[in-house]
Image (cartoon, grey):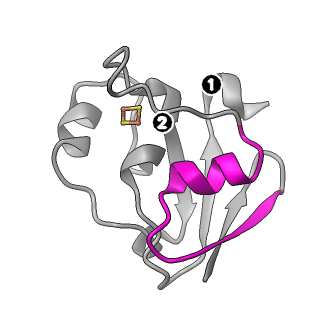
Amino acid sequence: MSTVTIKNSGKVQEVAEGTTLLAALQAAGVPIECTCETTKKHDPCHLFVLEGKKGLSKLKSPESDWLDAMVGVGSKSRFACQCVINGTENVTVELLGALSG
Ligand code: FES
């Protein structure tokens, strides 16, 4: 088990290894959705991983390609639907845009 802490709200969600970050946030009550298949826009699940980067699956294609094509990304940027909790570290994220509260 790992925890995902949402900096914006202070909520902490326990999650099992193999859970996506998206599912972890949804379990914490965050109204976040994956729109990869519907709109082909990925910004709805863009967030910053503040701590515990190693607790997530590595950044790889196609996520890295989508980040490269997006404006406003930083070194801490990830897409929640593409990250899988690996159970090695707890994770702290910062929600962006409309989800930031
Ligand atoms: S919605 Fe496309 S990367 Fe998450």
Amino acid found under the numbered disc labelled 1: Gly
Q: Which residue is denoted by mark 1 in the rendering?
A: 97
- Quarter placement of the C terminus: top right
Mark sitting on residue 46: 2
Amino acid found under the numbered disc labelled 2: His
Q: Please say whether residue 70 is visible from this viewpoint.
A: yes
Q: Residue at x 68, y 22 (%)?
A: 98
- Picture coordinates of residue 78 (x, y %)? 41, 47
Give above or below for 98 relative to 83.
above
Give above or below for 92 relative to 28.
below
- Quarter placement of the N terminus: bottom right
User: Is 21 covered by the magenta stretch?
Assistant: yes
User: Is 22 covered by the magenta stretch?
Assistant: yes
Q: Secondary structure at mark 2?
A: strand
Q: Is mark 2 within 8 Å of ligand 1?
A: yes
Q: What span is in magenta?
A: 11-30
Left or right side of 37 for 25: right
Outermost residue, right side: 10
Q: Residue at x 48, y 36 (%)?
A: 46
How many C-alpha atoms fall within 10 Å of the one at disc 2: few (<14), some, or many (≥20)? Answer: many
Q: Secondary structure at mark 1?
A: helix
Left or right side of 50 for 76: left
Mark 1–mark 2 contact, CB under 8 Å?
Answer: yes
**Separation (CA) of disc 1 from disc 2:** 9 Å
Give above or below for 63 relative to 49.
above
**Could you tell which of marks 1 and 2 lies nearer the N-terminus?**
2
- In front of the other: 49 or 22: 22
- Picture coordinates of residue 48 (x, y %)? 52, 47
